[in-house]
Amino acid sequence: MQARERYRELCAKVDTFFARVKARHGTDIHCAPGCDGCCRTRLSVTAVEAEEIREAIAALPAEVRRRAAARGRLDAPGRCAALEEDGRCAIYAARPLVCRSHGLPVRMVSARGLPVVDACVLNFTERGPGEADADCILDQSNLSLTLGAIARAHAAETGGDAGERFTIAELLAP
């Protein structure tokens, strides 16, 4: 499917972008396995992201799938259902774009309509995320628009609804 290939390419680009930011601003970025502050939320994903996650879940060892399904059925508020007890993500390889971009300096529009650059509170604590190199600031609007275009293409290919969203808990629960 073309849309899923485009989605995978977009994920690879975001991962490469993250690696570049980490290489240049490594002392400012504290993201690491087990750091799960960004995972203390409930997420929803597009249908194209959901397909990738379902495929990844099917490939997990039976015990990991069982634990993930139990967390999905529990659907605890304020906690991503994919978050393992050790602070690691059970679906890390297929994590959605929002998770891939967490921690990065991100340019977005504030509630007042003003452009701001923000990042995880653990990152860029000395200089602030706006002081990152200009090519190390992710534009959230461009990322969202690109994902939206891929989601619409996926819906056209599958006959689905381009606006349909799925919670991580829904995807994990059998």
Image (cartoon, grey):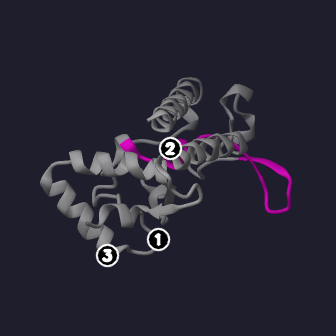
CA neighbours of label 3 inside 10 A, class few (<14), some (14 to 19), many (20+): few
Q: Taking the image as drawn, is residue 102 in sight?
A: no
Give how far across and how far down residue 149 sits, in percent: 63, 43
Question: Label 2: which residue?
Answer: 157
| 1 or 2: mark nearer the eye | 2
Label located before the other in sequence (2 or 3): 3
Query: Left or right: where does residue 137 sit relative to residue 25?
Result: right
Query: Left or right: where does residue 104 sit relative to residue 44?
Result: right
Q: Against 65, is 144 above or below? A: above
Query: Left or right: where does residue 72 sit relative to residue 37?
Result: left
Q: CA distance from mark 2 to mark 3?
A: 33 Å
Give how far across and how far down residue 1 sits, in percent: 43, 35
Give the magenta part as a residue range: 94-117
Callout 1 touching callout 2 (CB < 8 Å): no
Residue type (three-letter) at the residue carrying disc 2:
Glu
Residue displayed at 29% across by 68% down: 71
Q: CA distance from mark 3 to mark 1?
A: 12 Å
Per the image, is 57 magenta? no
Callout 2 touching callout 3 (CB < 8 Å): no
Q: Could you tell me which secondary element the residue under label 3 belongs to?
A: helix
Q: Against 169, is 128 above or below? A: above
Question: Label 1: which residue?
Answer: 78
CA neighbours of label 1 inside 10 A, class few (<14), some (14 to 19), many (20+): few
Q: Could you tell me which secondary element the residue under label 1 belongs to?
A: loop
Q: Against 28, is 80 above or below? A: below
Tally of marks: 3
In the drawing, what numbered circle is on residue 74? 3
Residue type (three-letter) at the residue carrying disc 3:
Leu
The quadrant the C terminus occupies is bottom left
